[in-house]
Amino acid sequence: MEVSCPNCYATYPINPERIPEKGATPTCKKCGVAFTIVKATGDPVKDRAQRMKGYVLVRENTIRKDFFSETEADSRKPPQKALSVKTILENRQFRLGACIAGLALLLGFTGFFVWKIQVHSRFEKHLKNTFAQASNTKVTIAFEEVTFALLGGVSRDQGTIRGLTITNRETKGTVKFSDSIDFELEASEKRLVTKPFNVYIDDRGSKYVMKDCVLEAEASSGTHLKFKADEVFSIVNGIEVFTVQRLEASFSTQGTEWKENPRFVLGDAEFGFRADDIHVWSESVLRDVDILVSIKNGLFAKDQPAADATPVNYMDIFRTKWGENKAVAVLERCSLRILGSEVKAGGKLEFKNPVEGSEANLRVSIKDFRHIMKYINRVSETAFDRIVVALVSLDEKKAAAYNQDSDFLDMTLSYKNSKVKINDQDLQSFI
């Protein structure tokens, strides 16, 4: 396996079995900085403590060994009389068949090679269009080149995206995401899956790292994207700001070309987000996050040729056209743990034109609400007092949201006619 220098991210091969129990301290050949390598214990608390000390953790690989046994044949066939090679080569039918087979093989290989070149060219063009579409007036996303393996299968190819960068159009500063990303492409299924890769971003003292990332993309029926990362963290001025463990984000759309603007698709979409653990300032804030949002009759940007991918005012379309098409967003699933409190939510947003006239309903239930209140009191006593006053006011108006005996909060938020209500009570009346 490979380890990376925490200062310059240079990678070096290493055998986990040769690391001593107390660890090892090699010196990076690229930048000259010494760093400590230790074996991961498997305990999240201990491993995190080691990481906070600046140690590089190495997990031992689990190797599966398959054992095969050979068996002898139950019976033996009697030997057959071998034909003479000279007799075969002098046979006229054999020579004619060999010539035809050779010609067919040559034509087939030539056609296969030309077809592969066309597939690779279309993929690279589509990738450029996608990045051009993702770029905006502030940043540009691009890559240096895409290369493919010389010999690929009939339905599957292997390739590499090199030099993935993002450029700030105002400052002209460029940040490199990754040197290379290996992937497998199934052209017939319009499906791409990357092999695990790491992303290192170093920008003006701020470092962002994503480890063991995998991207899956499919366009056979609509657009389907899924991004996974084993660990994501940010370091600012040497201090770890946040860490996300086992992140997964997904996005999918299906629809038809919008008649008013062919650069958009009118249809349905789903957004999903999951994470096992989110730490902020070395404190576990969120755990077991699972969120799913669906959208009906929404407008979504469609891939355009890079030359035609001029900036579009998405906000104007969102403010007016979503309401005209009666778009609806539904919070299908939302469950997570915040500071030890178990939170569940669900709701719906109906878009109107203009968007300020939209209507929304959200139901939130929180078990063990005291954990959140303790944290709020520690951060801001003013905010804590306002929440207590609001809960007491709801109770006085026979619209209680909090049950002190069970430490359970259950309330409904609604937005209509530019007014926010909690349990059918006007929010302004008790704030």
Image (cartoon, rainbow, N blue to C red):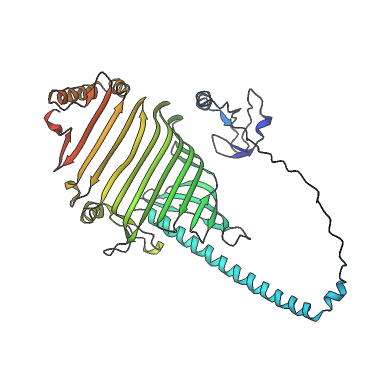
- Residue 258 in the image: state x and y as whole percent: 29, 62
Report the front residue among 171 and 419: 419
Identify the residue at horizontal 87%, vertical 74% (top origin).
86
Q: The N terminus appears in which quarter of the rendering? A: top right
Q: Is residue 161 above or below residue 227?
A: below
**Quadrant (top left, top right, bottom left, bottom right) of the C terminus:** top left
* Position of residue 345 measured from the top left corner of the image (x, y, whole percent): 30, 35
414 lies left or right of 259: left
The residue nearer to you, when weighing 357 against 134, is 357
Q: Is residue 393 above or below residue 135?
A: above
Q: Give the residue displayed 75% in from the left and 80% down from the top.
A: 96
Identify whether 109 is placed above or below 153: below
Using the image, determine if residue 54 lies above or below residue 180.
above
The residue lying toward the viewer, choosing from 405 and 370, is 405
Residue occupying the far bottom of the picture: 92
- Using the rendered view, name the quadrant where residue 2 is placed: top right
Give the residue at the far front of this rendering: 75
Image coords of residue 63 (percent x, y) = 65, 37
